[in-house]
Image: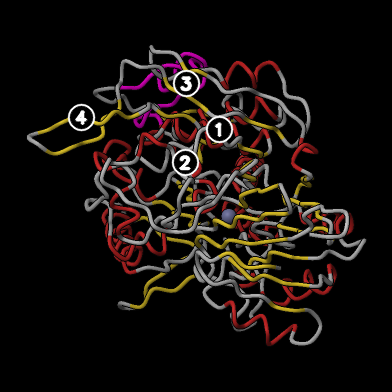
C-alpha cells in the first residue's frame, strides 16, 4: 500500500502448471483486480492415474480430480454444483476474480474453465470462443470439458451416499463472455446461442470492455487459430502473458507485432512458456517446409489413394492440405466433426474454408446421430462423399483422417495408397502403442506412411527441412529471443518441465521467479 493508500501490490498464486507442459492456472492479483491466466486441463498429471477407460467419476464432481492432485485444492474457485457435500477444500482462498483470460483453444489452456465459479467471465478471442463451443457441441460432454456451457448438477441421495447428477431437463448455462477483438457478427451471436439439444441454452452476457479488467489482448502465432497474448496493466508496469507462442508459423508476423507492441515501456513481468527451453537445438520444421513437402508428396504419388493426418483443430494445416489438394485436382474430404468446426469458425472469419466446391464431408451414417451431425448433413448436403466413391476414384480426393478414423478403411477398401502424417511425434507410451496399431492397419491395406516409419521396432519421424509437422512452440533459441526482446524485470517460467533451465539463459539480466505451487507470493 503506497502513501495515497492505494494497494499497488502485484501478487501471484500459481495454482497449477508451474512444472508441467500445460494445465496452466495462474492467478494474478494487482491491487484490487485479479485475473486468472488460463485454466487448462493438466494432462501430465491426469495421465499418471487415468486413461481412456479409467476415468474420474463424473458423479463425484471435482472430488476425484482434487483428491488425486489433478485439480488444485483452493477455496472459492469452483462452481458450487460440482462439490460433493463432504468435499473439504483446505487450499488457499482465491478471493474475488474479475475474469479468466484464455489465450487459445487448446484444452491444456482452456479445458477446465467450465469448472470455475459461474460469475467469472471468460475473456478470449471470438475465434477461440467458437472453437471451444464447436468442440463441446460435437464431442462428449464430460466434466472438465464443459468449457462453454453446462447442465447444473444436483446432489442426490443414493443408498445412503450422495451422487451429483446433471438434471438433463434443466436449461444449460454458459458464462459471460468478453470478446477481445471487439464486435462480433450476428452469425456468431446466433451460433453462440445454438444448442445441440432440443432444450435451450441460457447464454451469459456477451460484451463488456477489456479495459474494465485493465488488460489488452493482441494476436499471436500458435498452432491454433485465434490465439492471443494478454497484457495486464499494473502500477508496477505491464504483466505480459503470451500463452503458447512460436515464430516459425505462417502467421509469425503476429508474434513479431506482439513483441513490438508490448516491449515498451519495459514490462514488469513476463509469464513465459518454456516447452522447448531445455531441448537440444536441431533444425526446425517451419509451416512453409510442411507446405513444400506436402505438395511434393502429392505430385509424386499421382492418382493413388491418399490420407492426410494433421492434429485436431489445426486449421492452418488443413488450409495447407486444401491448397495442395486443389493444385493436384483433388477434393479435400473432412470428417463431419471438422466440417462442423469449420462452419463455426467461418462465422468469425469468413475466410475459413467450408465444404463446397473443393472440400467434401465424409458421409458414413451412424446408428445414432446428434443434432450437430444433422446440421452438418443438412447444410452441406450437396458436398458429401461416401466411402465407395473414395474407393472407386482415389485420385479425386485427399482424405483428412486421423488415427481414430482409420476404421472406415474397411468400407473404402483402398488398394494401396499413402498416409501423410502431419502431426506431433509420439511422446507417451500409449501413443507409441497407437502408432504400432496404425502401422498394422496401413500394412493390411498396403498403404505407405510418410512422416513416420519403422525400422524393426524403432519408430522414427521426419525432421527439419524434410519434416511434415511444424510445432506450435518456439525452439529454445526463439524463446531466448522473445525474452531478450521484451527484456522484462521479472520472468516467470511456466508451461515447461524445466523451469530451472531459464536461469541458464537469463541469469543476471532479469530476475527469474519460480513460484511454488498454491502459495501466494509477492512479485
Ligand atoms: Zn497450445
100 up-or-down from 155: above or below: below
Q: Secondary structure at mark 4?
A: strand
Q: Residue at x 57, y 48 (%)?
A: 95
In the rendered image, which residue does mark 2 sit on?
Answer: 399
324 up-or-down from 184: above or below: below
Q: Secondary structure at mark 2?
A: strand
Alpha carbons under labels 1 and 4: distance apart: 24 Å
Asked if the residue under mark 1 is in contact with the one under mark 2, i.e. CB atoms within 8 Å, the reply is no
Which stretch did the figure color magenta? Answer: 369-389
Residue 250: x, y in percent? 74, 53
Q: Quadrant of ligand 1?
A: bottom right
Alpha carbons under labels 4 and 3: distance apart: 37 Å
Mark 4: few, some, or many residues within 10 Å (few <14, many ≥20)? Answer: some
Q: Left or right: where does residue 264 sit relative to residue 448?
A: right
In the rendered image, which residue does mark 3 sit on?
Answer: 376
Q: Which mark is on residue 21?
A: none
Residue 380: x, y in percent? 51, 18
161 up-or-down from 354: above or below: below
In the rendered image, which residue does mark 1 sit on?
Answer: 119
Q: Main secondary structure of the magenta part?
A: helix
Residue 424: x, y in percent? 50, 62
Alpha carbons under labels 2 and 4: distance apart: 47 Å
In the rendered image, which residue does mark 4 sit on?
Answer: 156
Q: Residue at x 42, y 41 (%)?
A: 145
Residue 84 belongs to the span the image colors magenta: no
Residue 388 belongs to the span the image colors magenta: yes
Q: Is mark 1 within 8 Å of ligand 1?
A: no
Q: Residue at x 56, y 63 (%)?
A: 14
Asked if the residue under mark 4 is in contact with the one under mark 1, i.e. CB atoms within 8 Å, the reply is no
Amino acid at each position: 500500500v503506497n502513501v495515497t493508500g492505494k494497494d499497488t501490490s502485484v501478487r501471484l498464486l500459481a495454482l497449477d502448471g508451474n512444472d508441467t507442459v500445460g494445465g496452466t492456472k495462474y492467478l494474478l492479483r494487482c491491487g484490487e483486480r485479479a485475473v486468472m491466466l488460463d485454466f487448462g486441463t493438466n494432462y501430465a498429471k491426469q495421465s499418471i492415474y487415468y486413461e481412456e477407460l479409467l476415468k474420474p467419476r463424473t458423479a463425484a464432481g471435482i472430488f476425484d480430480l482434487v483428491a488425486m492432485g489433478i485439480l488444485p485444492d483452493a477455496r472459492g474457485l469452483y462452481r458450487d454444483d460440482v462439490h460433493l457435500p463432504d468435499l473439504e477444500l483446505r487450499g488457499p482462498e482465491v478471493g474475488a476474480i474479475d475474469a479468466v483470460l484464455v489465450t487459445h483453444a487448446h484444452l491444456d489452456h482452456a479445458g477446465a474453465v467450465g469448472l470455475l465459479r459461474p460469475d467469472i467471465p471468460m475473456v478470449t478471442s471470438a475465434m477461440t470462443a467458437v472453437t471451444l463451443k464447436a468442440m463441446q457441441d460435437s464431442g462428449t460432454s464430460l466434466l472438465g470439458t464443459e468449457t462453454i456451457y453446462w447442465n447444473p448438477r444436483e446432489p442426490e441421495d443414493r443408498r445412503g451416499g450422495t451422487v451429483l447428477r446433471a438434471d438433463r431437463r434443466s436449461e444449460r448455462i454458459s458464462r459471460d463472455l468478453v470478446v477481445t477483438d471487439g464486435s462480433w457478427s450476428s452469425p456468431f451471436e446466433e451460433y453462440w446461442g445454438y444448442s445441440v439439444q432440443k432444450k435451450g441454452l441460457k447464454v451469459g452476457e456477451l460484451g463488456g470492455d477489456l479495459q474494465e479488467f485493465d488488460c489488452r489482448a493482441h494476436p499471436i502465432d500458435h498452432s491454433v487459430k485465434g490465439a492471443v497474448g494478454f497484457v495486464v496493466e499494473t502500477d508496477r508496469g505491464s504483466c505480459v502473458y503470451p500463452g503458447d507462442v512460436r515464430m516459425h508459423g505462417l502467421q509469425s508476423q503476429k508474434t513479431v507485432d506482439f513483441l513490438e507492441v508490448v516491449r515498451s515501456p519495459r514490462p514488469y513481468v513476463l509469464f513465459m512458456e518454456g516447452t522447448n527451453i531445455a531441448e537440444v537445438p536441431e533444425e526446425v520444421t517451419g509451416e512453409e517446409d510442411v507446405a513444400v513437402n506436402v505438395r511434393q508428396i502429392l505430385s509424386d504419388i499421382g492418382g493413388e489413394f491418399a490420407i492426410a493426418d494433421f492434429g485436431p483443430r489445426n486449421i492452418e494445416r488443413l488450409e495447407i492440405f486444401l491448397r495442395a489438394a486443389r493444385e493436384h485436382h483433388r477434393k479435400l474430404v473432412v470428417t463431419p466433426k471438422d466440417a462442423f468446426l469449420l462452419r463455426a469458425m467461418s462465422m468469425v472469419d469468413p475466410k475459413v474454408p467450408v465444404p463446397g466446391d473443393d472440400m467434401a464431408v465424409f458421409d458414413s451414417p451412424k446408428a445414432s446421430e446428434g443434432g450437430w451431425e444433422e446440421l452438418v448433413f443438412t447444410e452441406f448436403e450437396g458436398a458429401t462423399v461416401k466411402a465407395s466413391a473414395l474407393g472407386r476414384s482415389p485420385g479425386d480426393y485427399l482424405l483428412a483422417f486421423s488415427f481414430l478414423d482409420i476404421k472406415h478403411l474397411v468400407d473404402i477398401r483402398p488398394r494401396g495408397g499413402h498416409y501423410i502424417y502431419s502431426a506431433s511425434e509420439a511422446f507417451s507410451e500409449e501413443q507409441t502403442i497407437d502408432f504400432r496399431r496404425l502401422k498394422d492397419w496401413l500394412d493390411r491395406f498396403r498403404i505407405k506412411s510418410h512422416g513416420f516409419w519403422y525400422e524393426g521396432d524403432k519408430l522414427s519421424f521426419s525432421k527439419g527441412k524434410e519434416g511434415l509437422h511444424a510445432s506450435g512452440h518456439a525452439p529454445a533459441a526463439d524463446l531466448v529471443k522473445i525474452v531478450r526482446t521484451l527484456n522484462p524485470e521479472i520472468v516467470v517460467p511456466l508451461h515447461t518441465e524445466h523451469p530451472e533451465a531459464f536461469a541458464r539463459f537469463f541469469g543476471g539480466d532479469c530476475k527469474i521467479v519460480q513460484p511454488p505451487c498454491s502459495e501466494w507470493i509477492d512479485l
